[in-house]
Amino acid sequence: MRQPPRQPPRHLLRRRHLLAAAPAALAASAAPAAAAPARPARPGRRVTTGFDALRADGYASLAGQRVGVISNPTGVDRDLDHVVDVMVADGRVDLVAVLGPEHGFRGTSQAGEGEDFFIDAKTGLPVYNAYNDAATMEELFAELALDTVVFDIQDVGARFYTYIWTMYLALEAAARLGLRFVVLDRPNPLSGAEATGPVLHPEHASFVGLKPIAQRHGMTIGELAGLFNAVFVPEATGGRAAELRVERLGGWRRSYRYADTGLPWVPPSPNMPTPATADLYVGTCLFEASALSEGRGTTLPFQLLGAPGIDHRWSEALNDRGVPGVRFREAYFNPTFAKWAGETCGGVEVQVTDPEAHDPIAVALTLLTEQWRLFPEHRWRSQDGGTAYWLDKLSGNRAVRLAIEDGADADELPALWEDDLAAFRRLRRDHLIYR
């Protein structure tokens, strides 16, 4: 049987990763491990994940396959054991390699970075960087002689969260190579009740949005895989789709927010510490396109927003708007990294008072329009120092930025994407698994 390469092709090898295993660790990992005894279930659990379904079926859908897994620290079971570790210990899956997305498999990298190649100290498996490179992913799948690719990552429900685009590129590579693709489904922490917000226009495609879906897509990762594989992958591959299987959730309802699932929360990325962060991120991530800090480098990312020179007038104007489900606290903070690191920023802390009543995209647009009205000196970030504005990429629609600059009220903005959103909702409806 062909063995997996112990290091990537020469042009992919850049530096030894800090997690590279010592020889003793590799020797220990080579010994067969006995399956750990089952631990008692935690009370109050309502939802089972795709991995629970896969394991309960004895890994039948992976039998006889050379398997590669795309995952990160969120790929855990109910006892917080990583699914890769569990499968290696079990011995019934021929797991030959792991691929990590943005932030890496073990989660050691910050925003916009993956992990370089390393040998995982715990399992002895080779780990490759699968972040933002379709050609490399296809090359790796072929080099590893994979039969099946497994994807298990917790999404947060926002179009610009890059894990869904890693999944899309992996699906495209699997389709080109004729591989099977298995998604271990996980809940959408924002619920799957509806899609909202602007839909990406193709001219703004980037790795924070490759295809025309809504800013808040309202789908599980498995449902998104079905949509991608049926609609977008064939467009890129001359009509070919991957052989897709979704291991389904048990007990999940579309109305559930993450707190309703009974599942443990593992931060999907360094600046996503809690489900409450994810709840605001789908809107306030738009401030990554602004000169204001979006709270990176603080304990409240995407909840603290501000910059030097901003004061109490912003929170007062926001609270006067009476935005449903939130209040805005005048706040001052000093980020330890990212924008305005080491400088005192004035701004707001967004407090969600009613999770069911607030619309995080409407909250973010109110924040942006009021900031632009009161503090217009804090403008947009540009990718090239000119007119390649990040807001166009994050919102997916150039008209949003132009309307804010022209003084539009936040309540006027949804009309800009009303038709696009209606079309996406119709498309989405055909690919929902959970009714």
Image (cartoon, grey):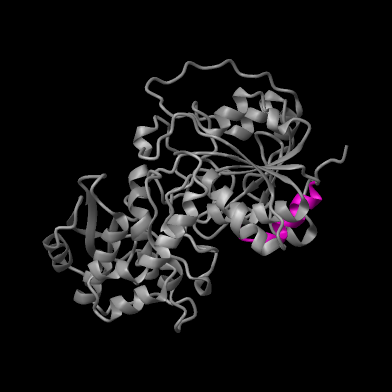
Q: Outermost residue toward the right?
A: 1
Is 134 colored magenta in this rendering?
Answer: yes
The spot of residue 380 in percent (x, y) is 36, 76
Residue drawn where x is 77% and y is 50% of the image: 178
Left or right placement of residue 20 versus residue 302 in this view? right
Which contiguous range is marked in magenta?
Answer: 131-144
Q: For residue 88, which quarter of the picture? A: top right
Q: Is residue 384 above or below residue 329?
A: below
| Nearer to us in this view, 144 or 122 | 144
Residue drawn where x is 50% and y is 72% of the image: 204
Q: How many marks do you count on the picture?
A: 0
For residue 414, say whether it is visible.
Answer: yes
Is 56 colored magenta in this rendering?
Answer: no
Left or right placement of residue 11 versus residue 109 in this view? right
| Nearer to us in this view, 245 or 134 | 245
Q: Outermost residue toward the bottom?
A: 386
Which quarter of the figure is the N terminus placed in? top right
Left or right placement of residue 190 versus residue 247 in this view? left
Which quarter of the figure is the C terminus placed in? top left
Q: For residue 153, which quarter of the picture? A: top right
Residue drawn where x is 29% and y is 80% of the image: 405
Q: Is residue 422 above or below residue 183?
A: below
Q: Is residue 322 above or below residue 408?
A: above
The spot of residue 131 in percent (x, y) is 61, 56
For residue 344, say whether it is visible.
Answer: no
Residue drawn where x is 28% and y is 65% of the image: 365
The spot of residue 26 in percent (x, y) is 73, 34
Q: Tell me which secondary structure the magenta stretch mostly adopts.
A: helix
Q: Is residue 370 above or below residue 237?
A: below
Left or right placement of residue 79 versus residue 91 in this view? left
The spot of residue 183 in percent (x, y) is 60, 41
